[in-house]
């Protein structure tokens, strides 16, 4: 991997005047009445916000409820990163139609944000193009452009000189040189976001016709220049926003609000930073144990680990080595034999129940070696992976004991456990237990009402972070 020292790349950037920026942004919020509707392709997208609703379905009733809330922003958890392209298309058509209908009924304008992975994986450009086309067919709206902003400070995802980086310690590695770019479903090669757009859209949109919001303009608070760039965008052309700090996003949003007020229309494809700034979410200290675990609960907690990225595996082993929890390996390779697989699922669940009742916290985790059936059997592998995911979820769904906390590691794992395992329909985001690691408070309808549900992304944190999260929950 090619990399560069973070300090070298950031050394020449001027320091922003944060107070000045925030005063300008506060002034610009006056008269901005749009509802911000965030479609989240996995549950980790709330990793920068708090006091915000997440709806786990996209019925018209849920969307209407979101529009009626006092909050400027609400999230719809689509979990579309685990969908096929066909499923993704149908879901985004449905949501786009319903949002447009509710907007007309309520008289409230809206901004759509497609919240995707900060390492550039996901159904892009399918999701935003589907919403654009659907809304343009059923209304008079014509979208001028699309904002691309994958910056996510808490996860070390920075965009500098139009190149998107992933931070590993003191090193910044171009996204196209990381393990994330080798994703079986959502792989890519480009790190320059203009080239990435060209690659993902198969040349429909090119790097040369893309608009770039530079760090120089952002750091000098050249709002007029940024506004002028945005006003020129038409025909759904793309806008790449560079950013290394929240102040950069705040400057951009100040100009963005101005052009929205003047009638420009954009869809946003972003990581989690834009949702916080555009939604006017204040900073909040990390959550403490007393906010997450009720006193007097003697049962142990449960941690579920499904993600297979290297970072997750390293974090799992650090947790196991700590002695804070008892490990239960789930031999998912038995999926090839139905009877043995069901016996294994039952063994893992009952073992977890016994430990939790004894007051011992437990981590159950899928066998770390990937199931590989060989060449030209990818479709069969996919079907088996769905069966494995369902089984991982069923262990929480079928628990006969209430754990004192629940942690799920990995985007797909946490989505399935939240929506199917815990049967959550609407959750409140309580905040973060560590930077970039959100906590839901489950609703009254869920299997374990008013529980702390910690959603731990597969690609966030250091080797020690999962252990540190459990230390907080255990009061160590």
Image (cartoon, rainbow, N blue to C red):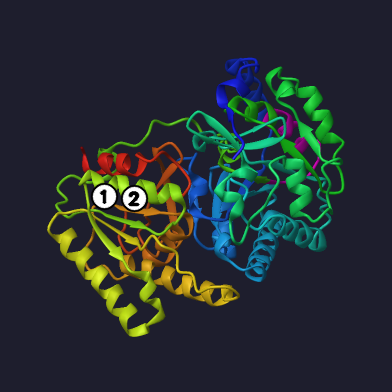
Quadrant that contains the N terminus: top right
Q: Mark on residue 320?
A: 1
Residue under circle 2?
A: 316
| 183 w.r.t. 71: above or below | below
On the question of residue 266 being in view, the answer is no
Residue beneath the point at 69% across and 65% down: 93
Residue 81: in magenta span:
no
Give the percent coordinates (x, y) of residue 331: 33, 69
Q: Quadrant of residue 211?
A: top right
Image mark for residue 310: none
Determine crowd level at label 1: few under 14, some 14-19, many 20+ residues with C-alpha closer than 10 A.
some
Disc 2 from disc 1: Cα separation: 6 Å
The residue lying at 22 percent from left, 63 percent from top is: 352
Q: Is residue 259 part of the magenta span, yes or no?
A: yes
Provide the secondary structure element on which disc 1 rests. Answer: helix
From the viewer's side, name the closer residue of 73 and 247.
247
Marks 2 and 1 in Cβ contact (< 8 Å): yes
Vertical placement of residue 337 versus 77, above or below: below
Q: Is residue 199 left or right of residue 79?
A: right
Name above or below for residue 262 compared with residue 88. above
| Above or below, 6 relative to 395 | above
In this view of the protein, which residue sits in the foreground, 48 or 35?
48
What span is colored magenta in the figure? Answer: 253-268
| Mark 2 Cα shell of 10 Å, populated few (<14), some (14-19), many (≥20) | many
User: In front: 353, or 311?
Assistant: 311
């Amino acid at each position: 991997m090619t990399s560069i020292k973070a300090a070298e790349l950031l050394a020449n950037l001027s320091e922003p005047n944060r107070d000045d920026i925030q005063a300008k942004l506060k002034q610009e919020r006056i008269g901005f009445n749009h509802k911000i509707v965030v479609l989240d392709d996995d549950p980790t997208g709330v990793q920068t916000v708090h006091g915000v609703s997440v709806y786990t379905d996209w019925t018209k009733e849920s969307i209407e409820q979101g529009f009626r809330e006092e909050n400027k922003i609400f999230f719809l958890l689509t979990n579309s990163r685990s969908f096929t392209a066909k499923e993704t298309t149908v879901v985004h058509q449905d949501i786009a139609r319903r949002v447009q209908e509710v907007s007309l009924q309520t008289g409230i304008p809206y901004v759509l944000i497609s919240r995707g992975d900060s390492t550039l994986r996901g159904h892009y450009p399918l999701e935003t193009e589907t919403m654009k086309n659907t809304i343009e067919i059923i209304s008079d709206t014509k979208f001028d452009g699309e904002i691309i902003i994958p910056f996510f400070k808490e996860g070390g995802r920075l965009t500098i000189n139009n190149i998107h980086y992933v931070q590993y310690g003191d090193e910044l590695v171009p996204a196209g040189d990381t393990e994330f770019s080798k994703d079986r479903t959502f792989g890519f090669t480009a790190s320059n976001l203009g080239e990435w757009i060209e690659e993902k859209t198969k040349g429909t949109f090119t790097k040369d016709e893309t608009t770039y919001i530079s760090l120089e303009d952002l750091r000098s608070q050249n709002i007029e220049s940024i506004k002028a760039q945005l006003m020129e965008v038409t025909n759904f052309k793309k806008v790449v926003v560079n950013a290394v700090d929240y102040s950069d996003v705040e400057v951009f949003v100040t100009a963005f609000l101005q052009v929205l007020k003047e009638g420009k229309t954009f869809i946003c494809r972003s990581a989690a930073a834009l949702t916080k700034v555009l939604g006017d979410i204040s900073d909040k200290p990390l959550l403490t144990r007393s906010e997450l675990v009720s006193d007097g609960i003697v049962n142990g907690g449960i941690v579920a680990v499904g993600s297979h990225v290297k970072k997750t595996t390293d974090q799992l082993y650090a947790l196991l080595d700590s002695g804070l929890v008892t490990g239960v390996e789930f031999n998912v390779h038995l999926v090839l034999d139905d009877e043995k697989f069901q016996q294994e699922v039952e063994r893992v669940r009952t073992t977890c129940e016994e430990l939790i009742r004894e007051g011992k916290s437990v981590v159950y985790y899928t066998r770390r070696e990937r199931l590989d059936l060989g060449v030209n059997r990818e479709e069969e592998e996919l079907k088996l992976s769905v069966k494995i995911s369902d089984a991982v979820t069923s262990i929480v769904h079928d628990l006969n004991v209430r754990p004192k906390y629940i942690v799920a590691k990995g985007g797909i794992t946490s989505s399935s456990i939240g929506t199917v395992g815990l049967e959550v329909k609407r959750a409140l985001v309580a905040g973060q237990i560590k930077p970039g690691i959100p906590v839901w408070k489950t609703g009254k309808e869920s299997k374990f009402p008013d529980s702390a549900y910690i959603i731990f992304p597969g690609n966030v944190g250091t080797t020690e972070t999962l252990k540190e999260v459990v230390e907080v929950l255990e009061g160590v």
